[in-house]
């Protein structure tokens, strides 16, 4: 069984110290599969994404399976002697009239994507075919904001809009500026000893795209879900406030709430948000604690903190003080998340 390589790499590999995650995967690492019936191919993980004409993989055509995301398969297939396309199909399910169910030997890895914002240096183009490079599918303007999913050699796999629908395609990475569109926010300054701030939401918004959800205001902060935490196009977020180029939000996801930071540029309106307010009081964990991306024992784990860990208390999750929202910084690692109140005392 082959797995898609979607490992997080060190910041200096591609885009310098401004970005802590630069994911790469290889289109040369795949599992071959024949679906047994014609499958429509979409340019993103789901039927709401753009479909290029009558794009489909034939019943007898071999498809390259690269990985899974949101119950969809990322595939590659040839559709003429000189053309190739990378796209997405739903993961086959059991049915009486189908023989397209994946077996254990066909299993491929779950993909993790950066989903970070960059801008273009000049006019350029994107293609669905980074193998034979047979077509320019999307024309891109100079200075355009690009949502970079991950990196593949000289290519960047990116999210665009085509005919008002989201579409994923490849463009040359050297056409992108290295600096993040959303720069890391300035470090908070510790002040006082009072712990009285309670998190409050000020607005509800739906960004309408796939964006990486960072635990703090910068790409140098940890992300939950093994580095793959993100907001999906249909998910709504509730804004708590702005911090530099970032918005602190609660995402109402199907699997449960999650808190984190999205670039302000991802917000559907560009109005300046009220700055988020924190106490930022130095504290110490009195017991070992799981730092999670939302209040609750079932929220996604960011990191396990030992007893005696130095943190900054930022706010309470609610007026009853059930969970504390804290920031942890040590050995180059940065994370913000929630711990039970008793772990930091009052």
Image: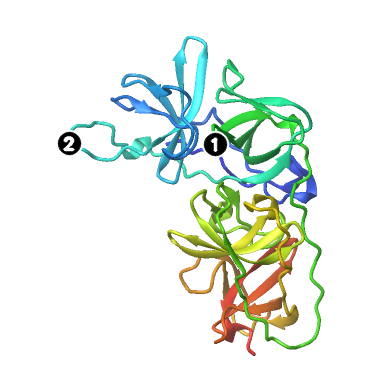
Residue 276 drawn at (x, y percent): 71, 70
Left or right relative to 98: residue 213? right
Judge depth for marks 1 and 2 and give the one in front.
1
Between 242 and 330, the one nearer to me in the picture:
242
Left or right relative to 243: residue 298? left
Residue 164 drawn at (x, y percent): 54, 36
| Residue found 75% across the figure and 56% down from its top | 245
Question: Taking 278 as reference, is 142 above or below it?
Answer: above
Separation of residues labelled 1 and 2 (CA atoms): 36 Å
Q: Quadrant of the C terminus?
A: bottom right
Residue 224 drawn at (x, y percent): 57, 59
| Residue found 49% across the figure and 74% down from its top | 296
**Outermost residue, left side:** 96
Between 189 and 147, the one nearer to me in the picture:
147
Residue 98 occupies quadrant: top left
Question: Taking 97 as reference, is 59 above or below it?
Answer: above
The residue pinned by badge 1 equals 164
Q: Quadrant of the N terminus?
A: top left
Residue 251 occupies quadrant: bottom right
Between 102 and 252, the one nearer to me in the picture:
252
Q: Considering only order in the chain, which callout, 2 or 1, is on the residue closer to the N terminus?
A: 2
Between 73 and 25, the one nearer to me in the picture:
73
The residue pinned by badge 2 equals 96
| Residue found 76% across the figure and 31% down from its top | 142
For mark 2, give the secondary structure. loop
Question: Taking 321 as reference, is 18 above or below it?
Answer: above
> Few, some or many C-alpha atoms within 10 Å of disc 1 (few <14, some 14-19, many ≥20)?
few
Q: Mark on residue 81?
A: none
| Residue found 44% across the figure and 46% down from its top | 70
């Amino acid at each position: 069984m082959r797995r898609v390589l979607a490992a997080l790499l060190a910041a200096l590999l591609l885009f310098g110290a401004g970005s802590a995650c630069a994911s790469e995967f290889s289109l040369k690492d795949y599992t071959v599969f024949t679906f047994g019936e014609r499958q429509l191919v979409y340019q993103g993980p789901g039927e709401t994404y753009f479909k290029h004409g009558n794009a489909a993989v034939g019943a007898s055509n071999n498809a390259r399976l690269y990985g899974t995301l949101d119950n969809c398969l990322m595939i590659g297939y040839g559709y003429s002697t000189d053309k190739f396309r990378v796209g997405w199909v739903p993961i086959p399910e059991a049915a009486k009239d189908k023989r397209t169910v994946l077996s254990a030997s066909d299993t491929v890895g779950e993909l993790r994507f950066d989903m970070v914002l960059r801008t273009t240096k000049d006019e350029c183009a994107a293609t669905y075919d980074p193998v034979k490079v047979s077509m320019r599918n999307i024309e891109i303007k100079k200075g355009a904001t690009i949502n970079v999913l991950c990196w593949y050699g000289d290519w960047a796999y990116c999210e665009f809009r085509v005919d008002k629908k989201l579409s994923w395609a490849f463009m040359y990475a050297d056409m992108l500026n290295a600096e993040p569109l959303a720069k890391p926010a300035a470090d908070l300054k510790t002040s006082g000893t009072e712990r009285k701030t309670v998190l409050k939401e000020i607005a509800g918004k739906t960004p309408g795209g796939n964006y990486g959800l960072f635990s703090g205001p910068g790409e140098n902060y940890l992300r939950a879900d093994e580095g793959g935490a993100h907001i999906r196009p249909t998910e709504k977020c509730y804004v708590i406030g702005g911090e530099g180029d970032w918005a602190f939000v609660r995402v109402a996801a199907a699997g449960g709430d999650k808190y984190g930071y999205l670039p302000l540029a991802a917000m559907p309106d560009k109005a300046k948000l009220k700055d988020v307010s924190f106490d930022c009081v130095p504290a110490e964990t009195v017991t070992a604690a799981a730092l999670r991306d939302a209040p609750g024992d079932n929220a996604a784990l960011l990191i396990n903190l030992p007893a005696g860990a130095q943190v900054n208390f930022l706010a309470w999750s609610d007026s009853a003080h059930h969970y504390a929202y804290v920031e942890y910084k040590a050995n180059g690692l940065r994370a913000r998340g929630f711990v039970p109140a008793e772990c930091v005392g009052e």
